[in-house]
Amino acid sequence: MALKYVCLLALACVCVYGKSSYKICVPSKYLKACQEMLDVPTKSKTQLECIAARDRVECLNYVQQRQADIVPVDPEDMYVASKIPNQDFVVIQEYRTKDEPDAPFRYEAVIVVHNDLPVNNLDQLKGLKSCHTGVNRNVGYKIPLTMLMKRAVFPKMNDHSISPKENELKALSTFFSQSCIVGKWSPDQKTNSAWKAQYSQLCALCEHPDKCDYPDNYSGYDGAIRCLATNGGQVAFTKVIYVRKFFGLPVGTIPAGTAEQSPDGFSYLCVDGSKVPVREKACSWAARPWQGLLAHNDVLAKLTPLREKIKQLAEAGASTKPQWFTGVLGLSEKIYHVADNIPIKPVDYLSKANYTEVIERGHGPPEPVVRMCVTSNVALEKCRAMSVFAFSRDIRPRLDCVQEASENDCLKSVQDNGSDLASVDDMRVASAAKKYNLHPVFHEVYGDAKTPNYAVAVVKKGTTYNKIEDLRGKRSCHNSYGTFSGLDAPLYYLINKNIIGHDQCIKNLGDFFSGGSCLPGVDKLQNNPKGEDVSKLKKQCSGDNSPLKCLQEDRGDVAFVSSADLSTLDSSQYELLCLNRPSGGRDSFSNNATCNIAMAPARTWLAAKDFLSDVSIAHTPLSLAQLLDSRTDLFNIYGEFLKNNNVIFTNAAKGLATTEKLDFEKFKQIHDVISSCDVA
Ligand SMILES: *[C@@H]1O[C@H](CO)[C@@H](O)[C@H](O)[C@H]1NC(C)=O
Ligand SMILES: *[C@@H]1O[C@H](CO)[C@@H](O)[C@H](O)[C@H]1NC(C)=O
Ligand SMILES: *[C@@H]1O[C@H](CO)[C@@H](O)[C@H](O)[C@H]1NC(C)=O
């Protein structure tokens, strides 16, 4: 026994360290790129192996559990890593720019003022005209807010009757007399416009105050300095490298260039209130550290071959920048100078830059939270991962997770102020809202067009049906009993158009399609407790009862399905019947948003009437969805989670949207009609 143990240990050493092989973790979408990287010739004979994970968040867990050895990360991911229990991560290399290979940080946040500004302490910034890079950005927004809110003269931001973001905007517009802070202040367009009108001083210094969005000559790193130099600004929040470029001073390896302005009239304002001419070394209040390579502690035992290999790969890819260069190694157009640092824990790495307090920025106690209710252990785990990730990216209010035994318990919990959000699928949104006195706040959207789903009627090309009457006496295929697309939508349509009677509506449906139908589940006891004759609605069922199979096998003339189901059907052979159009007609699958029966209720999150404003509640999930929209490699919140389907979000979701787009009044109407004709 003892001998075997020794052998195993020795073997492990040989394979991990003797041959110097290391496992790099990659988001699965970059696995192929990673394998291409393995074929790139380098002087180093060190072997790398590609380990695919769902996304970077899962990669952190893989490294912590030793399923992988290294993963390239942003400073915010280092923060996420530092929150994993029992972690022993170390930052082993920094990714710097070719322009500034010796700079300690990616960018240092500075305050720039005119030399003659009569200010000798930060409290005196009150009442000045301020220039910023843009909303939610590091040096122009997050860092100034983090530092200013520590000062007693800065307005409090803990008014819980408005959202955290609005608290920030209100405080800034009270503290400064005029500003230019461009960008999307809210992921919700309506809220964004309302805030821009209410806090218009925050746009007054912009080139286009009415737009207050990109592009604006007074936004961005150099725009903030231009705003100070030529548009009446008194204080600018930006980063060192752009100050030097703007004033024509040399930066790192870049020689002095042409100045937009002479540097002579401008100084940095330091945290202690002193001023330093911009020609000299800058004083900063905080910095964003470089991105870097994160490893687990065991890698330290044999660091050199790994570091050499990474450096050689970075050099090999520098001129052509293939996909593995960015997707796998995490390098970029400008950032590809790989520097060895003294191995350091992620928390210490962030603290050196004063960046931990920037990430953990709050709004003053009690910090607001938004509580999401979930019903399984795996959903709880995902919710917690989303919470830390969103927090690391400055998304507030912080997400809290509450677990209850069932969907109904969650709805009850929201009603009783035990949580703020619970989700329901399909038509349950109407009954749940009614029963628990809740209202919808946001919902999932699907497909590349990011729309809700629609209930549609599919027919074979070459047939002659154009409107509902043409289908009388024909055969129909349906999504299962209880679904919106398969039953509720067609049934409501027929009743609402007075084509079938309201009493005994299920039987009437069978009579209308007198050629026979397949409505899976219609004969189950719970769906037909009175034992009515539903044989017509079972007549076309055989074998695989999916409505599309039923249509393909010519057991029906029309199929009632969801637009989400269309991707599996050949669009050259079938098309949609536009029952929503008064004149009927037909159209192709891709036009399902305008040719359908009705919009379908998506998975929807409900909140209680009054505990917390909808803007506050929706801000965190919508901001997270927006951030990850183009970056599923960071955190793929849709799709499988730990091999489970539809955890918190359905696998098919592609985004989240506020509920204006969904017609909930219509769903309520449909619900009332259907439930009064005795369909569960
Ligand atoms: C803003 O920039 C554009 C393009 O560089 C330039 O044509 C325009 O004159 C600038 N406007 C102001 C107010 O500086
Ligand atoms: C961190 O903060 C201190 C004092 O508040 C300041 O002196 C120092 O320059 C800051 N560090 C960075 C990297 O900006
Ligand atoms: C809802 O619950 C939260 C957290 O316990 C509490 O802070 C808040 O005051 C409650 N709101 C109402 C209206 O009871």
Image (cartoon, rainbow, N blue to C red):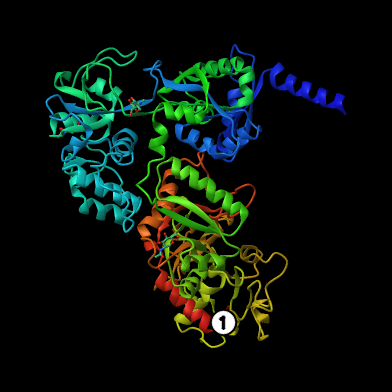
Q: Is mark 1 within 8 Å of ligand 3?
A: no
**Residue 588 location in percent, x, y?**
47, 59
**Residue 405 location in percent, x, y?**
61, 63
Do we see residue 664 in this rendering?
yes
Corner quadrant of residue 250: top left
Q: Give SS at disc 1.
A: helix
Quadrant that contains the N terminus: top right
Do we see residue 462 in this rendering?
no
Instruction: Write down which quadrant ligand 3 falls in.
Output: bottom left
Q: Please report the residue visible at 67 percent of the width from the left and 73 percent of the height from the top.
A: 540
Corner quadrant of residue 569: bottom right
Quadrant that contains the C terminus: bottom right
Instruction: Return the residue at label 1.
Output: 512
Q: Is residue 396 above or below residue 525?
A: above
**Residue 278 location in percent, x, y?**
22, 20
Q: How many marks are shown on the rendered structure?
A: 1
Density class for disc 1 (Cα within 10 Å; few <14, some 14-19, many ≥20) is many
**Residue 594 location in percent, x, y?**
41, 63
Which residue is situated farthest in the front direction here? 152
Q: Is residue 605 left or right of residue 19?
A: left
Q: Is residue 243 above or below residue 57?
A: above
Give whichever of 556, 367 is nearer the camera: 367
Q: Please report the residue visible at 64 percent of the width from the left and 64 percent of the height from the top.
A: 546
Give whichever of 216, 622 is nearer the camera: 622
Q: Is residue 570 left or right of residue 438?
A: right
Give whichever of 576, 370 is nearer the camera: 370
Identified by mark 1, the residue type is: Phe
Q: Please report the residue visible at 16 percent of the width from the left and 42 percent of the height from the top.
A: 178
Corner quadrant of residue 356: top left
Give whichever of 123, 591 is nearer the camera: 123
Q: Is residue 332 above or below residue 162?
A: above
